[in-house]
Image: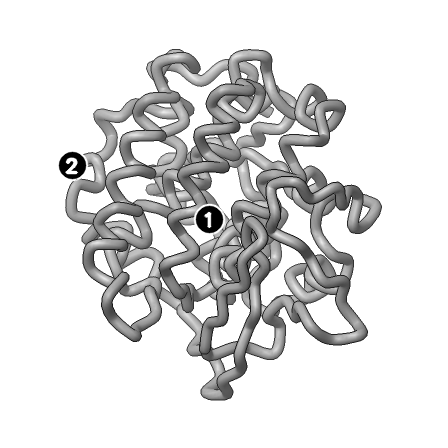
Amino acid sequence: MLSVVENGLDPRAAIPVIKKKLVGSVKALQKQYVSLDTAVTSEDGDANIMCSALEAMFIHALHAKYIHAEAGGKRKKTTHQKPLSQPVFWPLLKAITHKHVISELEHLIFVDTDVGCCRAWLRLTLNDGLMECYLNLLLQEQAWLCEYYQPTALLQDAEEGEFLLSFLQGLTSLSFELSYKSAILNEWTLTPLALSGLCPLSELDPLTTSGTELQRKESVDSISHSSGSEDIEVQHSGHKIRRNRKLTASTLSLDTASSSQLSCSLNSTAKGLSSV
């Protein structure tokens, strides 16, 4: 495990960097897609920047014991690649996620690491329009947050948490069909690590201003979604938002007997949807 990461951003200095990338990417997506009947996919550079910013949010100021030197999966490491830090917080996500979704993610053919499960979870959550809901549940779990994060962490800051919850409401105007079955997700890329302060920003060339390199990486080994479509009705702050979206068999179901229906109201009191 890595106790210290050299040359990274100070945790407090990383927070505005993460927020700037998140705000900029979401606004760019809204400008491009809000008037279109088109889903945002992993082919979009701004979508990948947004995912990296959200990943950085979860990585930011993790305790050192949750930052590993390698992802620990089945993929072979090439000797010429410089190893990247591999933060792991999958047990934390499992504490707020329905057991059926956990099972699906842990049995994906091409995703075979806890890092991969974290990254696949984030994309599936965006596909299902539940990011704000899950974040709200997580912010209520103070014991878990203290276990995983340093006091300076973005997720440990009450004001920043309120900002994130408010800002993520803007995602309800977008529909996502992000790839989450790709082997490329098994390890972290440079961008979220640099944004969170775990490696120097200078290693990004440039700092994902266009998203081209990240787009290329996230598109490798992508598994296409099934062609079936289904209406999803997501409850958001007391209002129903109906979306027509292509779904995979592993998409979180909100209206079947086998899955618990989640409310995305900020007043939701649901906790502990499954045990770790």
Q: Looking at the image, which residue is at 57% across and 28% down?
A: 67
Q: Measuring from the top left, give residue 62's x and y in whole percent.
A: 57, 24
Q: Measuring from the top left, give residue 165's x and y in whole percent.
A: 50, 37
Q: Looking at the image, which residue is at 34% across and 66% down?
A: 41
Q: Measuring from the top left, give residue 227's x and y in whole percent.
A: 45, 87
Asked if residue 49 is positioned above or below residue 172 in the image, the reply reads above
Query: Of the residues under marks 2 and 1, which one precedes in the sequence?
Result: 1
Q: Looking at the image, which residue is at 34% across and 62% down?
A: 42
Closer to the observer: label 2 or label 1?
Answer: 2
Q: Quadrant of residue 32?
A: bottom left
Asked if residue 118 is positioned above or below residue 17 in the image, the reply reads below
- Whether residue 247 is visible to the viewer of this picture, yes or no, is yes
- Density class for disc 1 (Cα within 10 Å; few <14, some 14-19, many ≥20) is few
- Whether residue 75 is visible to the viewer of this picture, yes or no, is no
Label ID, residue 77: 1
Q: Measuring from the top left, give residue 239's x and y in whole percent.
A: 54, 58
Per the model, the C-alpha gap separating discs 2 and 1 is 25 Å
Label ID, residue 64: none
The amino acid sitting under disc 1 is: Lys
In the rendered image, the quadrant that contains the C terminus is top right
The amino acid sitting under disc 2 is: Pro
Q: Looking at the image, which residue is at 27% across and 61% down?
A: 34
Q: Quadrant of residue 199?
A: top left
In this view, the residue in front, 99 or 84, is 99
Label ID, residue 206: 2
- Density class for disc 2 (Cα within 10 Å; few <14, some 14-19, many ≥20) is few
In the rendered image, the quadrant that contains the N terminus is top right
Local secondary structure at mark 1 = loop
CB under 8 Å between callouts 2 and 1? Answer: no
Asked if residue 185 is positioned above or below residue 230 in the image, the reply reads above
